[in-house]
Image (cartoon, rainbow, N blue to C red):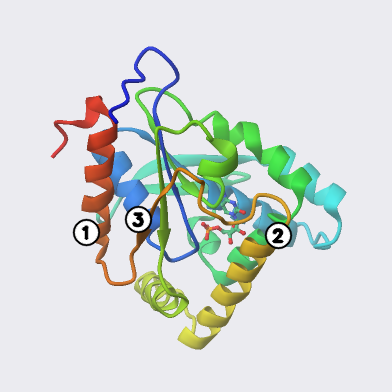
Amino acid sequence: MTVNSSKSMPPVITIDGPGGSGKGTVGQRLAWKFKWEFLDSGALYRLVGLSVMNHSVEMTDVARITELARNLDAQFAVRDGEQGEEWIILLEDQDVSDQLRTESCASAASQVAQYDSVRSALLERQRAFQVPPGLIADGRDMGTVVFPDAGLKVFLTASADIRAERRYKQLKSKGIGATLSAILTDIQARDDRDRNRVVAPLVPADDAVIVDTSEMSVNDVENHVLKLAKQRFRQLENIG
Ligand code: C5P
C-alpha cells in the first residue's frame, strides 16, 4: 500500500525496539536522507533520568520526577562536528550528549520510564515533532502509543549478546569506558524492565514490520527500512 498523506498530518515512520537493535543509527541516517524531522524519544527519558540524578531526587519520588519531566529544559540542536553535522542535546544549556549515552543514564531512564505520569508528561513534547515534510520517531512505544496512526511501523530486534557488543563498540569509539559483561547485564535488566512494565511496555504494534537485525549490518538494515519506506510513501519513491 502506498500512502500519500500530503493533505493530512505529516507522515510518520516509527522505529521501535530494544536498546542496541540499531534503531537510532538507522533512524537518524534515514531522517538525514529524507530531510525529515527525527525524534530520539529515548533521549527524553535519558534527560529525565539525568535530571533526577543531577537534582538528587529519589527514584521513588514520582511527583518530583513528573515535575522534572514536565519542566524539562532541553534542546536538540545540530552542530558541525569532526565528521560533518552531528546532533547535540542540551540540558539547562549544558551539552550533555556524551553523558546521556552512559549506562547510568540508560538505567535511570528505564526506571523513570515505568511511571505513567512521566510518560504522559512527555507525550505532547514527542507529538510536537510531527512536522512537515515528515518524521522518523525512534523508541519503545512510538508505534503503539505516541503515533498509533503512523504510515509505516518498524520493530527492530537482535539478540542481547549482539546488542551488548554493538553498544560496547559504540561507547569505546566515543572514549566512554565500560566492560562488555557490565553492558550485557545492564541491557538484560533494562530489557526486563521495558518489556514487563505495566504502561507502554516494549512490544511491537500489531501492524509493525518486525526485522531481526542480529545478522545484518547497519547498511543492510538501513537499505531494508528504506525499501519499506519507499513502498509505503509516494513522496520517497525517488530517494536513492
Ligand atoms: O532508546 P534508549 O536506549 O535511549 O532508551 C532509554 C530508555 O528509555 C529505555 O530503556 C526505556 O526504558 C526508555 N524509553 C521508553 N520509551 C521510549 C523510549 C525510551 O520507555 N519511547
Quarter of the picture containing the N terminus is top left
- Please indicate whether residue 103 sits to the left or right of residue 238 in the image: right
Residue that mark 1 sits on = 219
Q: Is residue 53 visible?
A: yes
Q: x and y percent of residue 40 in the render?
A: 48, 47
Residue denoted by label 2: 197
- Determine crowd level at label 1: few under 14, some 14-19, many 20+ residues with C-alpha closer than 10 A: few
Residue 233: quadrant of the picture:
top left
Estimate the spatial distance between the alpha carbons at disc 3 and disc 2, rounded to whole Å: 26 Å
Q: Is residue 33 left or right of residue 169?
A: left
114 lies above or below 166 = above
Q: In front: 204, or 130?
A: 204
Residue at 55 percent of width and 84 percent of height:
182
Mark 2: is the Cβ under 8 angstroms from ligand 1?
yes
In the picture, residue 186 is in which quadrant?
A: bottom right
Q: Earlier in the sequence, mark 3 or mark 2?
A: 3
Q: SS at mark 3? A: helix
